Image (cartoon, rainbow, N blue to C red):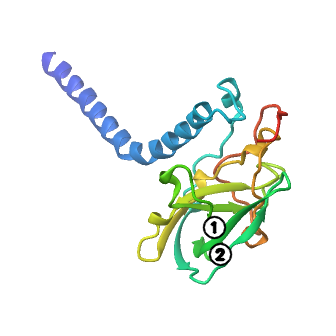
Amino acid sequence: MNKIIIKILYFILLCIHISCNTSKSVLPEATSLNEHREKYKAGFLNDPRSPLTKDDLTYLDFYEENPSWKLQCQCELQKDAKPFELPTYSGITRTYILHSIATCKYQKESIVLFLYKNITQPINPLYKNNLFLPFKDHTNGEESYGGGRYINLYTTDIVKDKLEIDFNKCYNPWCAYSDGYNCPIPPKENHLEREVRAGEKKYQGAYKKKEVK
C-alpha cells in the first residue's frame, strides 16, 4: 500500500515539475508586451499634461499580441533629406526630417515605412535619439482610432542597417482621448493598404474637452 502511495506522489510531483517548466519557457516573451503596456499606462499618470486619469485607464483597449506584426526591416538612411512641416490635427505644424526608410517583410509582402525625426532640440537629452513612425491602416475608424497610430523607435535600434518594428507596441495619439493636443497627421507615405490588427485599439471611454496646450 505504501509503495502505491509513493508512486502516486511521485507522479504528482513529476506533473507539477513539467507544468512549471513549461510555464517558464513561454513566460518571458508573453510578459514582455504586458510589461510594456503596463509602463505605457503608468506614463499617463506621471505626466501632468496627460488626458487620462487612473480611472480612465480601464477604458484602454488592445489587440492580443500578434507575432506576424513584429517585422524585420532593412533601413536606408536618408542623408540629403530636408526639414519639412508635418501638419497636426489642431492645425499647427511640427518640424521633422525624414531620417530613414525601412523596407519590411509582412508575410510574403513588402511594406515600406518612413521614419521621421523631430529636429527641435529636445529639453530632455534622453529624447535625442527618438524616431517617430506615424501610420494609418484599414482598421482606423472602426477598430482603432480614426486619426492613425504611432510607434516610437530609436536611432540606436538600427544596427548594421537592420531594424525590428513591432506594431504590437503601436499606440494612440492623445487626440484619441481629448481635444487640446497637437497630434501629427500620418503622411500618406505611411498609409498602409491593409488592416493592422496589433497594438492599441479605439479608446472605449468618453472623449474629453480641454484647452489647447
The percent coordinates of residue 1 (x first, y second) are 16, 15
Tag 2, which secondary structure? strand
**Residue at horizontal 76 percent and vertical 41 percent from the top:** 213
- In this rendering, the answer to whether 143 lies above or below 1 is below
Quote the CA–CA distance across marks 1 and 2: 13 Å
Residue tagged 1? 116
Quick check: marks 1 and 2 in contact, CB under 8 Å?
no
Disc 2: CA contacts within 10 A as few (<14), some (14-19) or many (>=20): some
- Quarter assignment of residue 110: bottom right
- Quarter assignment of residue 66: bottom right
Callout 2 amino acid: Val
Q: Nearer the viewer, residue 123 or 57?
A: 123
What is the number of callouts on the image?
Answer: 2
For residue 63, side relative to residue 2 (left or right): right
- In this rendering, the answer to whether 4 lies above or below 205 is above
The percent coordinates of residue 199 (x first, y second) are 64, 50
The label nearer to you, 1 versus 2, is 1
Disc 1: CA contacts within 10 A as few (<14), some (14-19) or many (>=20): many
**Residue at horizontal 79 percent and vertical 70 percent from the top:** 188
Residue tagged 2? 112
For residue 33, side relative to residue 160 (left or right): right
The percent coordinates of residue 48 (x first, y second) are 64, 32
Q: Residue furthest bottom?
A: 80
Q: Residue furthest top?
A: 1
Tag 1, which secondary structure? strand
The reply to whether residue 46 is visible in this rendering is yes
**Residue at horizontal 62 percent and vertical 65 percent from the top:** 119
The percent coordinates of residue 108 (x first, y second) are 61, 76
**Residue at horizontal 58 percent and vertical 51 percent from the top:** 169
Q: Nearer the viewer, residue 160 or 93?
A: 93
The reply to whether residue 191 is visible in this rendering is no
Marking on residue 83: none
